[in-house]
Amino acid sequence: MKPSPFTYHAPESIAEATALLAELGDDAKALAGGQSLVPMLSLRLAAFEHLVDLNRVAGLNAIERVNGHLRLGATVRQATAEHSAEVKSSVPLLARALPHIGHFQIRNRGTVGGSIAHADPASELPAVALALDAVIEAAGPGGTRRIAASDFFVSTWETALNDGEILSAVEFPVWSGRCGFAVEELTRRHGDFAIVGTAVGVQVDGDAVTKATIALFGVGATPLRASEAEAALMAGADVAEVARAATAGLTPSDDVHASGAYRTQVAAVMVRRALTKAIQEARA
Amino acid sequence: MAATTGPNTVSAGRYVGQAVKRLEDPRLLSGHGRYVDDVQLPGMLHVAFVRSSVARGTIVSIDTAAALALPGVHAVYTGADLNPRVGMFWHTMMGPPPELGGQTPYAPLTPLAGDDVRFVGDPIAVVIADNRYIAEDAADLVEVEIDAQQAIVGWETALDTDQRVHPGMASNVGQEMPATEVPEVEALFAGAPHVFTRRFAQCRATNVPMEPRGIIVHFDQYAGDMQIWAATQSASEWKATASRLTGVAEHRVKVVANDVGGGFGQKMMMTRDEAAVVMAAHLFGEAPIKWTEDRRESLMTANQGREEICDVTFAVTDDGVLLGAKVVFWEDIGAYPSAASSIAGMAGAVFPGPYKFPVVLPSGSTLYTNTVGKAAYRGPWMIETVAREQMMDHIAYELGIDPIEIRRRNVIHADDLPYTTCTTMVYESVTPSETMEQALEMLDVAAFRAMQAEAREQGRLLGMGVSIYIEPSAVAFGILSSDQAIMRMDNSGKVIVAMSTGNHGQSLETTIPQIVAEHLGCNIEDVLLVQGNTESSPTGPGTGGSRSAVVAGGAAMTAALKLKDKIVQIAAHMLEASPDDMEVNESVVSVKGTPAKALPFAMIAPIAYQMPEMLPQGMEMGLEVTARFQPAGQYTWSNATHVCTVEIDPETGMTKILRYIVSEDCGRMVNPMVVEGQIAGGVVQGIGGVLFENMIYDDDGNPLCTTFLDYLIPTAPEVPDIEVGHIETLAPGLTGFKGMGEGGAIAAPPCVANAIHDALRHLGIHPTTFPLGPSQVLQLLNDAKG
Ligand SMILES: Cc1cc2nc3c(=O)[nH]c(=O)nc-3n(C[C@H](O)[C@H](O)[C@H](O)COP(=O)(O)OP(=O)(O)OC[C@H]3O[C@@H](n4cnc5c(N)ncnc54)[C@H](O)[C@@H]3O)c2cc1C
């Protein structure tokens, strides 16, 4: 479990980092918290001749409010976000998702941007980004562009980032009104990746649900939004029915922990439980 | 961990019976243990293995040129280099193979693959390089072409196929214990009021020592000496095996085991990978070489356990009284099991366990498959308890009797003792009935049943399980029959006791000094256990099989009494008193009733070494004794009852353990804290075997659990507090100690399974197969709904 040889680069600016990545192409990989990349290198499941460490890049680790969004720089540690009062009050769904990531030691190193850029389909943060219609800022040698979360996740460990681009920030919309949020997931042990999970948010007005979002993770190659189920919820369907709608037609794959059929069945349970909690919270 | 104490508590001594804090902990818990990988030697080189990526196939070619050309690589050895140099490859504990006059049917063992590969991970070549990074880079550069064949996976496939895991063998059966046809028994079954049959299966688990395997070997070809540092449960076994492998005379081989981070049976006998490092070092001859198994190698290639099936047929009366049992064991032993022999003999012998079976007829077969070999794993025979204790519940439900009540009708009581089982095992001091009652009282069965009924009204699923077992500790045969203590008091009155033990988590650095200090009459900090060094420790089997308290403890106690006797004689001579009138306390010998007439050990010791004129006439100088101890019986029986309660989430199939209770009797406890620690560790492994751990192979023999993402062991949040009750009835013989290192892992799986069964049985669900993880339980619930 020793990685194959690589050259280590520690750029200090976005320009330097993206120039390096563009120049080195496929032989290079960005390194953030290292909590996914380093194990893959050590297991020799991946090998790169160059690692471009983003940890020293200036301007990537701020948490700030910008036009109705909360903007988190790419290298903000998961633990920092988890304990941020700003995150807790502005983007409660993110705050609730973070403690589900592994163990605190992992969150101390792992970054918010790294988790989203890594795009593991069983990860919480990509689902939160998708649920909240977050905007992902990509920085490349030619400048920055903004990508909607719904366009960002392409497949397992695959995103819309181009060669030479890094994820520089994620902007999460801040919800207002009477809202409730919940993350429900099934893990076999504390700290494991979820077998399946969901991140949901609702906004209510009296008895009516006026806004709803349901994202699922661990059920396909990318996190998935259950748009029809969201519409059904806003149209007044009960949560059990919504949960069934949210998971109808899913085809998750089997692995050593559970079959695809198990995931589908339990995903509905998670959605129902999450929506029940979120609605309760919104109405409270 | 809450502890209650049972009624028969024997009085604790100054040390024995006390929860003395572990003497090894300051070193280990502060991260200053010295495991194999911590050993750094001048000029040391590092080993990585080239391993097979297919489960079965013929090796067409191996090209090592590119690897050898990599700077920093010193050697690449293949099977062709090492295998022909092997003298003999067998284990002292198992005895020689038939062709050398023994009886153990070993798998055809070579350190590296020869013409073919037989499981994924089969070692094909050894790379020696400046460091592990380069060694792994070079291993990647070795080109191996294999003509792959369909793997033989699963014991039933192995039984049916005409293909062989080991080419040239007549069948894939490793060992067979044929069923005996006894007409009386057939008649008994034919005439029995009820006969029930079930097949119980447990899934493959791996031992997961915190420190994986590891070995450093230095063959100094100029001196002709070999020195080994190893993660082993038995330095003696490594010494003998290395000598047989290489032909280096055994007295020229030195083995050192410093701290060893667990083994659970996996490190009892030297495995092929370690043998390959020994052979490579012997051929290389220049510098020490180190192999530290990494976690993926450990999960993929270190031997594994538990893949066993047990077919049981019970004959019972209407009242649930046991009339007899037929038991068939099927074991998947992989390609290269480390303990070649089947567990069927042992499992059959102890199958009756805590119950009065009039007859038990065991039989069994082991099957080779193209998977990792079978290891001994904490209670290697425990499928018998797994099957028997689940079967008791299955029968109870068939007959409409409460599982507790059916146990009460069959369990051995105090007034049955001494009791000889139908398999000729003799119990003199066991308490299965008493531990059961104590554990049930700790639970408060009535309160739980009320809670269960109330929960069921709300659609919640609660259940309770019971399992009882009798543990055959300190198995005494062959090299396992005895242990020795070499004890010497030095000039300053401190004591060193050298033993063959291989402490790897059993707390022997504390418990052996407790025993010595108790019986010698000194302070515990004046006693040091020296072990794991073949130059200073005696020959012996090491630590395993729940033997060390009983056998090593017996030797330590005997030696301490001998040494005390000599010290007292010297003191009595000097104080002009009779040895019979002397007493020893806190390292001071005094005349009873006259505390002023006293001599401390620190004064007696120099006299023994330096002043022959002051010793009693004819007494040999010095304060050195040896004692070899053989336990009274072939087994020293301990026993326990486990009780647990669970709640199952009906929508996800997740099981949560609510309470876990153990009532145990291990005779006189050396250290209750250590006893409870051993129980907790075993119970956690047992819980793992039902709810979490499952080493899966696909149909092509690929292991699917190669990291801790896939092979799940319970972690602290998944483990309930383990409540322990103690009953102490002394074992026959000098010490009163009974071994108890494996029991937690033996009784926990059926206990958890029975609790799950209890939670689900009203739905018509009667599980028989592990694992019972969330997906399996939800499947059972779905099936029951139809
Ligand atoms: C034991 C364990 C348990 C875990 N459990 C969970 C869990 O339950 N849920 C979960 O979501 N995650 C889990 N993780 C993963 C963890 O959250 C990782 O930290 C995260 O997925 C990756 O973030 P990182 O900062 O560590 O990125 P790295 O490991 O450094 O990088 C991961 C990948 O993303 C790329 N990358 C990183 N940052 C950027 C960027 N700014 N721009 C472009 N590309 C980038 C890298 O090139 C690499 O390909 C676990 C990890 C471990 C070790």
Image (tube, grey):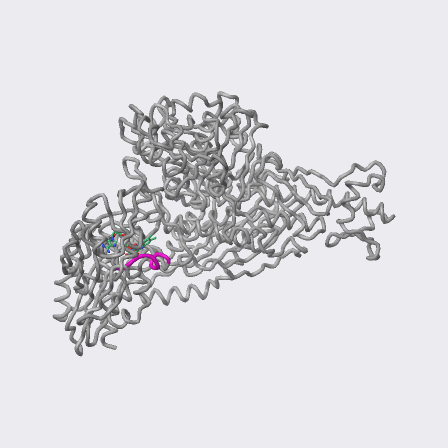
Q: Give the vertical position of B132 relative to B406 (above or below).
A: above
Q: Nearer the viewer, residue B287 or B711?
A: B287
Q: Nearer the viewer, residue B466 or A232?
A: A232
Residue B759 visible at all: no
Q: Nearer the viewer, residue B266 or A61?
A: A61
Q: Give the residue at x 28% y 66%.
A: A95
Q: Give the residue at x 83% y 57%.
A: B596
Q: Give the vertical position of A208 relative to B86 (above or below).
A: below
Q: Give the vertical position of B54 relative to B755 (above or below).
A: above
**Quarter of the figure with residue B112:** top left
Q: Which stretch appears magenta?
A: A105-112
Residue B401 location in percent, x, y?
Answer: 43, 55
B730 displayed left or right of B153: right
Q: Farthest residue to the bottom: give it.
A: A206
Q: Nearer the viewer, residue A256 or B333?
A: A256
Residue B217 location in percent, x, y?
Answer: 49, 33
